[in-house]
Amino acid sequence: MGALFSTEGFARLDAIVRPGLLCAFDFDGTLSPIVALPEHACLPTELMYRLVELSAYAPVAIITGRALDDVRERLGFVPDFVVGNHGIEGLPGWEEPAARHRAVCRLWHERLSSILHEPAMFDPGIVIENKRYSLSVHYRHARDPIEAESRLRNVLMHLEPLPRVISGKCVFNLLPEEAGDKGSALEQLMQISRAQSAIYIGDDITDEDVFRLRRGNLLTVRIECTTETEAEFFLRRRQDMAQLLDELINRLHTLGARNWTLPAPISH
Ligand SMILES: O=P(O)(O)OC[C@H]1O[C@H](O[C@H]2O[C@H](CO)[C@@H](O)[C@H](O)[C@H]2O)[C@H](O)[C@@H](O)[C@@H]1O
């Protein structure tokens, strides 16, 4: 993995950025800073203005672990595509399988709520975020987060049906086994939008499903340099996102690209 802001990284950007590019982003930790409480997360205005400008040149997609209605109200603009619940919510035909996922999540929620109320497990700092089609169990504010992580891991192993567990930043995300993921969501979005190439930026384990696609026409970028990733390049800090959006906008503008998913402007 190399630095995106390097000779090699800029060369890869030059190669991938062309008319027909889909620009896709994770939300928490990529666009929005990680904050103590999920309900306080929002899109910083300096990124929001840039994303609006970018969407004149290329379709913009948000692929997030959050529920759709939750993330939409945090964006402050309307992207071309929003996919929620780690890929479960928002793609054509998503409702039918999601109804099955909802029933499974209801079972898990009931079971977990009851276990987490047992005296030996009770900790007001452990919170279940019910996103209807997936659950997030947050332990950022647990009395002892390291101990909570290992106790929760043990509880999750015994749930029925067994969930697909994606760990994250002080969180376990629980998904039904047959649910899609962010990788399949990105591939579907490329098909739907007829994109020739794509860039995806993410910061967490749930984004690895995109990073491991390893397609020649997909540039993957992880926030923060780590060895535990399949992403091609990294940005040192989330704050570098503004510069990355400027790099995309400037290249697309120079190439005369336009967002082909928008109605054509009326000519007089
Ligand atoms: O796929 P993402 O958009 O990155 O969403 C992943 C999870 O993000 C949220 O939790 C994380 O961000 C919170 C706000 O900064 C933070 O308080 C929490 O500790 C993080 O785990 C969100 O609440 C989850 O639903 C998402 O699955």
Image (cartoon, rainbow, N blue to C red):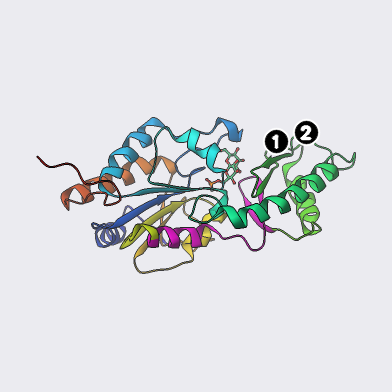
Q: Which residues, given as a range, are shown in magenta?
A: 164-191
Q: Secondary structure at mark 1?
A: loop
Residue type highlighted by circle 2: Pro
Residue under circle 1? 141
Q: Are marks 1 and 2 in contact (CB under 8 Å)?
A: yes
Q: Is residue 135 left or right of residue 1?
A: right
Find residue 124 and name its label: 2
Alpha-carbon span between mark 1 and mark 2: 8 Å
The quadrant where residue 241 appears: top left
Instruction: Report x, y in % for residue 82.
Output: 46, 46
Q: Residue at x 39, y 38 (%)?
A: 78
Q: Quadrant of ligand 1?
A: top right
Q: Residue at x 26, y 52 (%)?
A: 260
In the image, is 118 to the left or to the right of 125? right
Relative side of 152 to 223, left or right:
right
- Is the residue at mark 1 in contact range of ligand 1, meaning its CB lies under 8 Å from it? no
Q: What x and y, as percent, mark residue 129? A: 67, 40
Nearest the eye: 1 or 87: 87
Residue 220: mark: none
Kindly identify the amino acid type of the residue bearing the numbered disc 1. Answer: His
Residue 200 rendering spot, x and y as whole percentages: 41, 55
Residue found at x 52% / y 59%: 208
Q: In the rendered image, is residue 147 in sight?
A: yes
Q: Secondary structure at mark 2?
A: loop
Q: Earlier in the sequence, mark 1 or mark 2?
A: 2
